[in-house]
Image (cartoon, grey):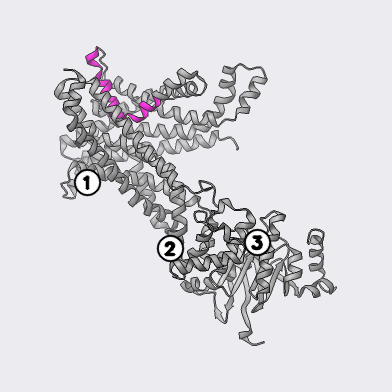
Amino acid sequence: METIAFLVDIIIPAFWNGLLVTLALIAVTAPIGLALGIAIACGRVYGGKFLSRFFQGYTIFFKGCPLLLLLFILYFGLPPYGITLSPFVASIIGFILCNSAYNSEYIRGAILSVKEGQLTAAKALGMTRNQAIRFVVLPQALRRAIPGISNEFIYLIKYSSLAYMITVIELTGAGKLIATKYFAYNETFFALAVVYLALVTITTFGANAIERKFAIPG
Amino acid sequence: MSESEFILKVEDIHKSFGSSEVLKGVSFNVKKGETICFIGPSGTGKSTLLRCINQLTIPDSGRVLLNGEEVTHAGSKINHFRQKIGMVFQNFYLFDHLTAVRNVEIALIKVKGMNAKDAREKAMTELRQVGMADWADHYPAELSGGQAQRVSIARALAMDPDVMLFDEPTSALDPELTREVLEVMKKLAQQGMTMLVVTHEMGFACSVANQILFMEHGIIKEQGSPQVLLNDPKFERCKAFIGQFREYSQ
Amino acid sequence: MDPLTILIDWFPYLLTGIFITVGLVAVALIIGVVLGLPMALGQVYGKLPLQSAISVYVWFFRGLPVLVLLFLFYFGIFPGLGLDLPAFVVGAVVLGLRGAAYQSQIFRGAIQSIAEGQMTAARSLGMSRTQAIRSIILPQAMRVALPGWSNEYPEILTESSICYAIGVAELLTRSSQIVSQTYVTMPIYLACAVIFILLSYAGTSLIQRLEKRIAIPGFGPGNSS
């Protein structure tokens, strides 16, 4: 009974605020991460040698560098050079860099899987290269990349928790603070787990529905 | 005919998949050394019948007796019976991660408990029998269909079975490759192996089989020796069926 | 103080951190396989209750952020069980349990991709189901699983850095220590990033060499008959 009271009076309000911050982090990161991912993938496939190599390096760095380290670099590493980012902004930038790197891999793979003939046919109809990419290749590639992209989105929900490590009080941060303050570790963290599991599970169902909707036969 | 003269007895096998009854009471007996060919339109349960004999498919009712011992309802003893019943599949099912000789010897080692040296010797002997000794160290992916099927015959023979079951052994092969497999099977029959063969190769059936069993709609419609089936006007359906293939058979 | 001198002075300290990171990853990978493979077998060949239990496990450990799992186990579950485990152990266990969840699905996919015919042939020769799984299915499944499984390595490597949050003295923690003691930030952090990237590259190369060594002509995903 005590636990229920604890749950309702303390956990729910704190979690609610934390959840809003988490959702804000995700809402800002996801579209930008996707757009950037598309740009990088196109740059790697269609860009000149220099651009392609540059983006390859970008992808290697932001995939190989642990996200937490990246957040430290942005939050602790920049101020000495005169750039001071708020924890929230530093988190967003870190997430975008990481998310875009992974997205670009999925999208690049999808672009490469679209047959050469598609581009050729488009050009034969008189489209410029850019038009062909925009109206023929990308729509197909993006459809094929949906599983990968939605997978990354779910990862984003999970690693948004790392923002707590640079003092953003999102969902995990809220949980840790409550647990520490009230010495209620098991209750709080299990409640935290429930919320994340709910978020991830709902998103997974949504992602599957989207995949089904956009599936092209063959 | 006393019980002991029949090496294999199949009694009243019924099998349904979902709502469709594929085998509607199939019975026949096989003498030692006989070659029996099953022919008939596709989908009439011939393959299912073979699989019911070694219990890869469990029949809904009926019995199978090998050398007088009941194979159906054998429980875990089924593995013992399967050693005595060799099976060759349409798609060979060679173990892709093993070389040809390893394919042949693995069951000798794991199931029969032979030591490595004896198993290797036996495996090479069987491969020689089917003409594949030179390919012993090749992987299935490196073999043509006919070569792969011959290795799979060697694999089944290595277990010294009492009966060999062939489930459309050449149906997945190109015509040129079919011949080499049929040659091996002919040789086996001449050496006295008891064989049950499901096939569309009418030339083989008519020249090698002691008995042809014509199946349609899940039962044995007509049966008899090739000469009788082809010439006796009683066997209308069978003759008509074989007739379709005449143009193509050797 | 220039960064290069710092790095050289602190190198032994950092090196220990590298070893601890590698140790974390190695233990996690081992736990991942030791638990993940049986779970995969359970999901493919086991009865329904077992399959459901495993599915719940996978859902739980895949659905939660690593940070939350670390907090849950380090502050909640283990103390609740009366266990006072060092942070390294908790970190390795959590990463391992999570790895097992992911790897079980990789193994499961690989096992299921082995054509039914392989099992049929094995059984027709008189092998029991266990023998068939051990001698015929698993050797093939493991080869098929290797490319997908190799992605686990860089993932667990980057996730190991999150163990910073429970005080494991691995590479990131030690790099941060150096930063806080020398007040040199960016160069140290960048060096740390480079080390992580090199570790990732080294491990992946090793696995690719392994793949080549155990490769069988004509054998790969989608190739069995």
For discs 3 and 2, the disc positioned in front in the rendered view: 3
- Give left or right: position of B202 versus C97: right
Boundaries of the magenta span: A58-81
Instruction: Residue A69: say if magenta.
Output: yes
Q: Residue at x 61, y 70 (%)?
A: B164
Q: Are marks 2 and 1 in contact (CB under 8 Å)?
A: no
Image quarter for residue C167? top left
Extreme-top residue of the structure = A82
Does residue B21 appear in this view?
no
Residue identifier under label 3: B169
Report, in whole angstroms, how far the alpha carbon at label 3 lies from the one at label 2.
27 Å
> Which of the chains bears the disc numbered 3?
B
For discs 2 and 1, the disc positioned in front in the rendered view: 2
Residue identifier under label 2: C130
Image quarter for residue A178? top left
The answer to whether tags 1 and 3 share a subunit is: no
| Amino acid of disc 3 | Pro
> What quarter of the picture does the N terminus of chain B occupy?
bottom right
Would you place residue A94 above or below residue A144 in this image? above
Q: Position of residue C94 (x, y in %)?
A: 27, 43
Extreme-front residue of the structure = B134
Q: Residues within 10 Å of mark 2 (few under 14, many from 20)?
A: few
Q: Residues within 10 Å of mark 1 (few under 14, many from 20)?
A: some
Report, in whole angstroms, how far the alpha carbon at label 2 lies from the one at label 1.
36 Å
> Which of the chains bears the disc numbered 2?
C
| Amino acid of disc 1 | Ile
Residue identifier under label 1: C77
Closer to the camera in the image, C46 or A83: A83
Q: Residues within 10 Å of mark 3 (few under 14, many from 20)?
A: many
